[in-house]
Image: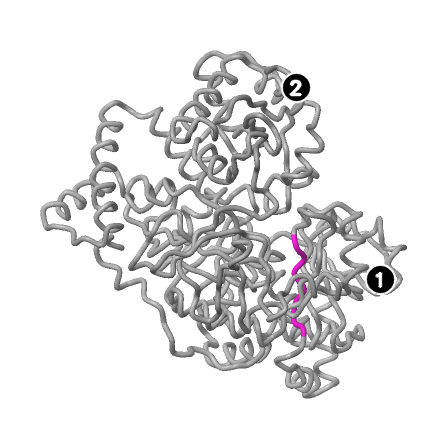
Amino acid sequence: MSNLWDLSHIQPATASVLGGDTITAMFWNAVHERGANVWLRQKELGIWKSWTWQQTGEAVREIAGGLLSLGLERGECVSILSNTCIEWVLADLAVLSCAGVANGIYPTDAPEQVHYLCQDSATTLLFVEDDEQLDKALQVRQQLPQLRKIVVFDMKGLRELDDPDILGLDALRALGREWNAAHAGGLEQRVQSVQPQDVAILVYTSGTTGRPKGAMHTHAALTYTARGYNTLIARTGQDEAMCFLPLCHIAERMGGEYFSLYTGCKLNFVENPDTVPENVREIAPTVFTGVPRVWEKFYSGVMIALKESSRLQQAAYAWSIGVGERIAQQVLAGQPVGAGLRLQFRLARWLALDNVRRLIGIHRARYLVTGAAPISPELVKWYLALGVPMLEVWGMTETCGASTGMLASRIRPGSIGPAAGFNQVRIDAGTGEIQVKGPNVFKGYLNLPDKTAETFTEDGWLRTGDVGTVDEGGFFRITDRMKDIIITAGGKNVTPSELENELKFSPYITDAVVIGDAKPYLTVIVMIDQENVEKFAQDHDVPFSNYASLTRAAEVQALIQDVIDGVNAKFARVEQIKKFFLLDTQLTAEDEELTPTMKLKRKLVQTKYAEQIDAMYRQG
């Protein structure tokens, strides 16, 4: 179990733990060196099934042979349209073993988006998860003349399908066995042909500002970054991680699949996105990377459970978290923790904090990592008070993931940490923009040389679009996106993300967009947390018939007003929110207002709800 005053269990590692200058070479070296060790685990029919490195290698060999039998050439693109699962990883590694380019497509994407991404990437072969994802591909297949075959992971419900250009994964593996038997050494030759400078993967941006752009990452950048991650916080073959974020996003692809490939950390796959809370308690990962939405959800679940507990349990929690907060304050200040407080913390863990950690599923966690979006500093402090350090990292698709990372020995909530040792980070003197340079930075946008050129400064630094500051200790802080900073009608510069993070700390608010550019005061669009607000309504006998009526209930409006009032108290009067309205539609990743990573698209929301926004200002 981790102790807040002893962080020796969270140390970076500088020595290389696995050879290989391409992801392909690294993977096959791992198969050779780790053979019988378990790498992947996934639940099948209620039972966790383990995959050793040897079993994984055998499956990848067969899938790769199948792809070669279908004529996959060096440098051709293969796309994967699926939720996060072991088959995703097998397909990815097989494509790379064939010297192909692997591209991920969000399983929530509509057919039109699938068409655009396959067309833009010149996809020749497409993996899909099941009949639902196959339907999307079939709707646009006629518009994709370069697409030769579609491979389905799960053929359930498709047994009667008779289409020469569609086959199941098992059938592809059978083709691969035949091809490998007939072409001895053929796959090995293709593997050896892969060069570090070759493009390995495409990662399309989320498309918050126009059409998604395909960021090209080379094998050299991916292997360099995987080794670099271990110099931030080391993982080992004894660690267990959870794979649940979309693998087409750089966070899970790099920080989950490839980082675990490098270190040997066991990778556990959740059953589906809805079972994450249940699966994390089963897996009890020792290292856990998530996005703020996940950490906020866990926190709100604990707060709701606490309201339903007995007064004795509430009192035990209050005392225990108070002890944790006192220790956290000393750790954050770099002060030693006395023996008396240590003893109290052991009692606090026994009384309440260990139960909270088990409720979430982080009772074995050495540390937590948060990234991909800003997080409330208060949330970081809360997890720290539980006894689990939370380390914030910052990066983007174009930097191959994390470029800065919080040090376990010097946690500063609200900061994204110093520059990672494997790249350089600076603040542009003129604009305040954070800029990055290093071998981890992407090669450019596919088919968009002008956009690529715009993304770099004359001296070769990547323009990130984030505005920030850096202190004398080298710790960076994000203030906002350059395009998101609000200048009110009175000339006041406001950073909306600070207000939004405070609002999202409430268990009743999932997301928020602050409005106020060229306006006399600030307003906010709020997306409520359906589960927690419904629970509130039931507990307080608030009648509602559907989601829309729930958002219109006077008691719910008052509940959100109370949250806003609490947040306003922390800010100067000119920065306070005067009006709000609640989105009355329950949004999912399929809705245009949300990115695939479940973030509200600020510009789209402001355009789509312009009438409601104008009403907040007409009302005075």
Mark 1–mark 2 contact, CB under 8 Å? no
Mark 1 or mark 2: whose residue is earlier in sequence: 1
Image spot of residue 371 (x, y percent)? 48, 52
Residue at the spot 75% in from the left edge and 84% down from the top edge: 182
Image spot of residue 496 (x, y percent)? 52, 38
How far apart marks 1 and 2 lie (CA) works out to 54 Å
Image spot of residue 314 (x, y percent)? 26, 27
What element does badge 1 sit on?
A: loop
Location of residue 233 with respect to 350 vertically, above or below: below
User: What mark, if any, has residue 509 been given in the picture?
Assistant: none
User: What mark, if any, has residue 615 been given in the picture?
Assistant: 2
The answer to whether residue 412 is magenta is no
Relative side of 614 to 343, left or right = right
Residue at the spot 42% in from the left edge and 56% down from the top edge: 470
Colour scheme of the rendered structure: one colour
The answer to whether residue 204 is magenta is yes
Instruction: Count neighbours of disc 1 (C-alpha within 10 A) and say few if under 14, some if 14 to 19, many if 20 or more.
Output: few
- Residue extent of the magenta highlight: 199-205
What element does badge 2 sit on?
A: helix
Q: Quadrant of the C terminus?
A: top right
Residue at the spot 76% in from the left edge and 63% down from the top edge: 448
The amino acid type found where label 2 is placed reads Ala
Image spot of residue 66 (x, y percent)? 73, 72
The amino acid type found where label 1 is placed reads Asp
Location of residue 36 with respect to 616 vertically, above or below: below
Location of residue 211 with respect to 449 vertically, above or below: above
Name the image quarter holding residue 88: bottom right
Name the image quarter holding residue 601: top right
Q: Which residue is mark 1?
A: 165
